[in-house]
Each structure stands twice: as C-alpha cells, then as structure tokens.
Image (cartoon, rainbow, N blue to C red):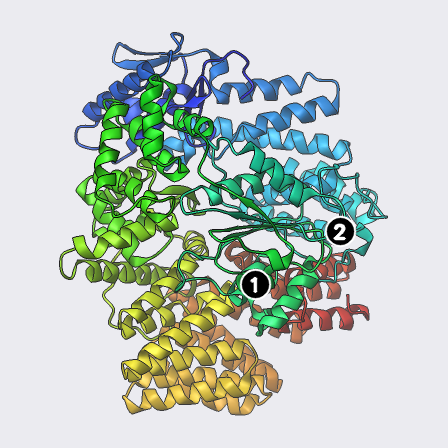
Amino acid sequence: MGIGKVVVELRVLGPVEVWNRGVPLQFARRQQRVLLGILALEANQLVTGDRLVDLLWGERPPQRARAVLQTRLSEIRAILDLAEDPDPAVLLDTTGGGYRLRVSPEQVDAQLFRNLVSDQRTRGSDDEARSILRAALALWRGPVLGGWLPAEGQADLTQGLEALRLTANEDLFDVELRLGNHRDIVDDVVELAGKHPTRERLAGQMMRALARSGRGPEALTSFDRWRRWLRDELGTDPSAEIQAIHLAVLRGADDQADTDGSRTAVASTQPPRPQDGQRRSSPARFQLSTPRNLPADIADFSGRQAELTRIEKILLRPGAGARIAVVSGPAGVGKTAFSIHVAHRLAGSFPDGQLYVNLRGVDSDRGLAPFEVLGRFLRALGVDGLHLPTTLDERMDLYRDLLADRRLLLLLDNAAADDQLSALIPGGTSCGVLVTSRARLGAILGAQTVALTVMDAADSALLLTRIAGPGRMLDEASATALLSRCAYLPLAIRIVGAKLAAKPHWTVDRLVQMLDDERSRLDRLSHGHLDVRASLALSYQVLSPAARTLLRRLGDIEIAEVSDWLAAALLDTTADRAQELLEQLIDAQLLDFSGHYPSGQPRYRLHDLVRLFGRERALPEAVPGELSAARGRAFGAALSIIEHLVHALWGGLSLTMRGGTPRWEVDELLVGSSATDLLGWFDVERPTIVSIIKRAARDGLGETAWDLACTASPLFPLRRQYDDWQHVLDVAWESALAGNDIRGQAAISYRLGMLSLDRQELDQADEHLKRASRLFDDIGDLHGVAVVDAYLAMVLRFRGQPAAALERYSSALAGLRDTDVGGAAFVLRGMGQAHLGLGDQDGAKAHLDESLALYDTIGSAPMGRGQALFWQGMRLLAVGGHDQAAPLFDHVLRITAVLGDRHGQAQALRGLGICHHRAGRIPQARAALDEALRLVQQPTPSIVESFVQRTIHDLFGDGG
C-alpha cells in the first residue's frame, strides 16, 4: 500500500485482508475477517454490539447473536496477538457495551484512499494528479469488505466510500481527457457510465471520449438512449452543460480523434506490433473484442526468478519467429500457478488481450479438442456463436486471420500432446503462447521449454513462511524436515502451510510426524501424483466429516467450478451450511476462490488433482446409493434454476416439454431472482450445465438428460452459444435413443428443429420438426404436436409462404390457447408477422394486439413481449406511424440492453433509425444504424446484419 514503515495493514477495499510485516494473517472464518473489516472502517470509533449484529446479519440474526459476536471478537484478538512481533498500536478494546479498534488511520487502506483522492486536488500538474488517482484506485480489489455483508448493512456502511470511488474515477477521466489519453480510457468510461446513468459527469465524459476516439455515431446514440432514460425514469432532461457537449459532438467540434492512427511508441519490452493503419478500423466492419480471461494471480507467489526471467525473454524477444514457451514438470510442481503469474506480469505487453484455457490433459477422457477450444477463443474475440465455422480447418483459418495483426497472449494450460496445440498457435509472430504440460512438448512448433522441478530449499522455505507465518518457522531443522516430507512440491507446501496457519496449537514437529505416518502407507514415493496424494490425504483427514463428504461428492460429479448452489444440492443442506463447508475447503487449500457471479455470490475452483483425489475417495468411502442420489439432486437443482430463468424471461415454461426429473429447489439467495441475476448465473454456469447433461447421460438417466437439454434450449441461442446447444442436443438424443424414450426423442427432435431454424437450414428444420410431430402424435401428446406446428409455420414463413404459414399457425393456436398462454402469445405474434408478409395491416394489428394482451396477463415476460412490441413497431412504420413506433422500439432497446441481447438491440436500433430518418433527424438515424451494425458485425453477415445493411442502403444509398 505504500505506507512506509507501517507494520500492520488492514485492507477493506475488497475481501478483508490483514498483513503484518508483509505477511498475510490467516483467518479460519469469513465472519472474523468481515467483523474486523467493519471495525477498521469505523477505526477509533465506538461501535455498539447492536450495530455490529445488524451489520453482520441484517434481519436474520442467529438466536445467540451476541454470544457469537463475542466469540468472534475473542478469536480476532487471539489472531492479532499471535502475529509475529505484533504491532502494539493496533488494539481491539471493549468499552461500555461497544467495541473500538485503535489503529493509525494510515494503516487502513480506505483512509489512505480518501487521503490520496483529497491530495490530488491540490496538485498543479495533471501528470501528478493522474499518478495519484491511479495509485488510489489501485487500492481497490473489489467491493468494500468483499461485498460479504447483507445488502442493507453493505449500503449503510460503504455507500460513502463507493461514491468517492466513482468521483475518483471521474476525476481521473477528466485528467486523462485533458492529457489526450481518450483512447486509453474510452471503454472504461462507457462501462462505468452504463452502470451509473444518474451521473451526468460520466455521461459527458463518455460522449467526449467516444467522439475523440473516432466513435462519434456511438456517442450520439448513447446520448439519445441516456436522454430517454432520464425522461422515462426521472422525468427530467440533461443539464445545459451536457446538452452543449452533445451539440459539440453533433457539429464535430469535440472530435479530436487521431486521424493517422498513430499511437505512442510501445515500451521496448513489448513484442513488435503491426502498424495501426493495417488494422480494420471502419465502423462498418467487424470489430474484435479484447478478451481478458486469465484466472486470478497467486497473491503469495514465491521464487522461480530464473525461470521467470527466461520465460519473459522467450515471449518478449524482438525479431521474427515463434514466441512459444512450454512450462513442463511433474504433477504438483506448480506449473499452472507459475504460468498464471507470468501471464499477469506480461499482460501489459499484450494489450490486445489474454486468452486462457485448461486443456485438461491430466484427464485423457476429458481433454478438450482443438475444435472446441477454437470455438471458445473465437467467441471470446467477439465472433457470434451462430457464425462459428463448422469445420476445424475453417475455424483455424478464421482464428489466424483475426490474430494476424494482434498482440495477444495465450495461456494453454495442461496440454497433453502436440496435436492438441498445433491448431491453437497463431500464424503471425506478434502473439505470445505459453503452454503448461507434464511432457516436453512443442519442439516441432518451434517452442522453447522451461522445465520446473521441485523448488529449491530457499524458495520452499520462503513460500512456507509466507503461508504459515514467520513465527512458526523459528526452528530451522524442523522446517527443513517438513519441507523434505513435502518433497519440495509447491502444492504440498501450500497444504501444510495452511494447516499450520489454521492450527496454531500444532507444532512443526507434530506435522512432520503426521507426514511420516502418511508416507509409510504409500506404495512408492516420487515427484508425481503420489506426493500430491499424500499431501492431500493429510489435508483431507483433518476436515470435518461433512466437509470430507462434500469433497468426495464434488470429485464424483467431476465439475471443476464449484458454487454454493451445487454444494447445497450435493449435500441436501441449507445455503448457510453449504457456505460453511466450502469455507472449510478453502481454509484447507482444497478450493481456490475464482470470482463472483454478477449477483455477487462467490465461485470456487477445484484443482484437477484435488478433484481426482476426491473421486478416488468417493467410491470406497460412500454408502450404497449415496453418490447417485447426490448427483440426482445436483441435476434437479440445475433444472430448477433453469426453469426459474426461463420463467423470468418468457413468463412461464411455454413451448417446452417437461420431463419427470425430480426438481431440487435452490435458495434464491444463492443465485438471485431477477432475470439479469439468473442470466448472469447461466453465463457463468453454462459449462457446468453442459457437463451435468453429459454426466446424466453417462449415468443412464436419459430422461434427465433430455429434460435438462430441452428446458435450457432457449437460453443457448439467446447467448449465441450454438456449439454447446448442438452438443447437448446430440448427447440427449443419443441417450433418448438408447433408452427407447419416445417422448424424449420427440422433445429433442423439436429442439433440433429450432436450432436448424436459427441457422437458416430450412430443409433440416423441416425434417426434424416433422419427425417430432410424428413422435408426439404416436404417444398422443397433443400439446407437443401444437408446439411443433408453431415452428413448422415459421419454416413456411421463412420460405416466403405466409398464407400456408397462417394455416399451420391456426392449427397450433387451437392446441395451445387453453393450455399454454405463453405459447399462444408466441403463435399470435407469428400470425401478425405472416399478415404483414401478406400486406394485411388490419390482420397484423389484430393478432399483434392480442399477443401483447396475453403477455400482459402473464406478467413478467420481457423476451416474448419485446418481440411482439418490435413487430408492432414495424407494423406502425408500414402505415406511416413512425411517431407511435419510436417509443415501442425504445422500450425494446431497453429490454434487450438489460438482457444483453445484441441482436435484439440491433433490431430495435434499426427501427429507431427508420423513425429518426422519417422525422428528419438524419444524424440520429445514421448514428442508430451504425450502432446497430456495430452490435452484430461478424466476419460473415448474419440475417440481422443484412437487415441493417439493407436499411442503411435504402435510407442513405450505401452499405455503411
């Protein structure tokens, strides 16, 4: 934190951390950290016990809240007192029914942040102010206290700090704009302005940064959207100052963009980069995203300096030739942690992004194929899932073309063989590639190998000291003995260090004896898996029985990313209990924190070797039926959450087939209840859903597999994840065939027809849907027949046969009107579109009005209602009603923006562009259409992109 001689640092601008003389103190419970963080925020002030109870538990305190509070405070005192050479200036007092943490203000990062923000305002130089503001904002590692308090307490305690953080960002943006660094901040300004629409200062900065970066149309569109939001939500208009900025952008008076594409020369440590003039810069061309999906860095990484230096020389060396480094070594030696640390160190040298993938080479049966990895990478680079090439060669060609002039770092973790790598290596020389593997790979690809062995004694001792604390390592002989029992493997050292930190009453000698006992039971000792197994077994044995059960069940279900909802289902327990047991696994270094859901709930990562260890223990230690029952609850929990999400988006489970899989209800506190929270859950958990469907099929649970695949089907195209959608439908189809499940075959045939429709493969769609109709008819499922009729009508409409489509829609409506309100609303909307195709405006109006009326009776159905509103707007445009259509398109734009539906946003902007043009607002029309094109631009044109291009041509006589 840059505090000079400060001994103890209390960090609350993120998950709570306490550092004593450069070493983090270990806390066994999250409550201890949060409680200390509250007192640090209220440093040197008396905080009553009642207030602490309210902040910690909100409206749900435990029965003996005061007793629990006193226990936690006693534990905190003990931890502070046991620190190496504790700071006498840090005292936790009990005074008159309250508590006070006595500490110097400069020891709390929140106070340091306040001081820095205040200090920069007295500086006369923008360069000085910029440095100070960036240093202040760098103190933030996440929400105050990690966002671990109940919402009401979090707001009460942290609102002022969060507001000051926003102000500091605004101050920084002003400075950067004055310094001409608009390109460096534009994306950050746009993101922050979108999250905080009530901050007018941010809105003005966003327009200036966009205009000066050559994105004037986007600036105008953003302003128009924001102005409408102000009117609708607050009943007000932008201030005169903001309107003046808008006028300047319209006139081009604030557009100070670089016209020659020149940039400040990059530092000499960066690999060479093609000239910016060679980049695609037209707003009407596909624009790549900048992916940054590295896992979190290791906070207490130690040693390996020689290897770090060599890797950096390989990846940053000047001149032509491949920049490929392979980090090889045995299991548990720390290859992944080392490589992630390297990637974070070098991120600034690869400004076009960093891509990460775990190739799962440790599991020969679960390794990722290049085809799948290229799909992931292309999506991360901004390629829409519907436009991913369907062959490996085509994906390789597109991937190499997109990266040909980019400076990007790839981390390919856990590779098994060269054939897993060759397709993933970019064709140019501007990218860096970092590979980890147990084997020495890459020679034929021009790679250079850096071999990691066990750590040397000095680095091992440093790592152990940082984890366990210097006070535990005073006896050098005992420490050396412990390190030798760990075989100097970093994973084993981390495990024993965590045990010492969590068990202050254990001696190092005692732990040495325990490791001796464990090793004597092994068949052999090497630097491979058995070393890690011995260390993991030690950690496993001191877990509570329930935590051991959780680890076994996590290993059995074979899912690498773990969250509260999954743990609760596997254990058939409450949210609180699941969180408590996950905390035990974290404290034991068996789980790593990997991030948060958008709703704020934490997620954890299970290391491959830990997962294999859990699976190893599962079968011999489980009682008959235990594991299958746990997996069944996990399947039911995932299905329950998916159904809640579908309900939140479409107002119910319309147009779907429900199987007999038992649902396991998940506490909404674990995943959220709003459509945006649940969509955020799906975005994060999509790989888990795919894994769960595959596992259900492997378990012979065909009905569960198709139930999950069918119910989740509308979500995959919404998120443009067509590869995954195809994969789960193929798995479910094979499972239904194997089990001779006719209803399952019908349901998956129907969803395969939907997928083919989205891909505009009309003959295949017709084939899948007609097979589904026959199968539903064979088993007397009239609802299924009616649902399929609705999609067969869409095939006819797409083929330009609106009259035939209306006949099929009428048949579908007869079967759905009394049994599936959402399905009936969907069909009526399609009938309105068919009438529009026939030029029958009255028929279109009647059916679209009825569709919207049904959606109103359903309540919350943003997706279905938004689509009906869009087509009502298009109908109004067809009869000259652009003034009436504009509010409908604007409403659709707000719905689709909240849900992250880029194609829906583009359609709404297309409608708004036409409305603006007809009203004579030509700049706004062009801005809206350019933004629509930007949202859907792909290497190969989509249907929506073609619509937008056609509209631009019709209105302006060009293709954008």
Q: Is residue 722 left or right of residue 410?
A: left
Residue contact at pointers 1 and 2, CB within 8 angstroms: no
Comes first in the chain, label 1 or label 2: 2
Can see residue 938? Answer: no
Q: Give the labeled residue for mark 2.
A: 320
Residue depicted at x 69% and y 64%: 915
Q: Quadrant of the C terminus?
A: bottom right
Give the residue furthest to the front: 524
Q: In the drawing, does residue 185 fall left or right of residue 715?
A: right
| Most distant residue in the top direction | 88
Check disc 2 and report its element: helix, strand or loop.
loop
Estimate the spatial distance between the alpha carbons at disc 1 and disc 2, rounded to whole Å.
24 Å
- On the image, the x and y values in percent for residue 130 come to 69, 27
Q: Position of residue 721 (x, y in %)?
A: 50, 65
**Disc 1 residue type?**
Leu
- Direction left: furthest residue: 624
Q: Residue at x 27, y 88 (%)?
A: 779
Question: Where is residue 937, by image quadrant?
Answer: bottom right
Please say whether residue 478 is visible from this viewpoint. yes
Q: In the image shown, does 433 or 630 lie closer to the viewer?
A: 433
**Residue behind mark 1:** 374
Q: Residue at x 25, y 36 (%)?
A: 60
Q: Is the residue 503 above or below the residue 852 in the image?
A: above
Q: Amino acid at mark 2?
A: Ala
Between residue 532 and residue 842, name the one nearer to us.
532
> In the figure, 235 relative to 739: above or below?
above
Q: Is residue 63 left or right of residue 611?
A: left
Q: Position of residue 280 (x, y in %)?
A: 76, 58
Is residue 427 found left or right of 146 in the rendered image? Answer: right
Q: Outermost residue toward the right?
A: 260
Specify the label residue 220 is tagged with.
none
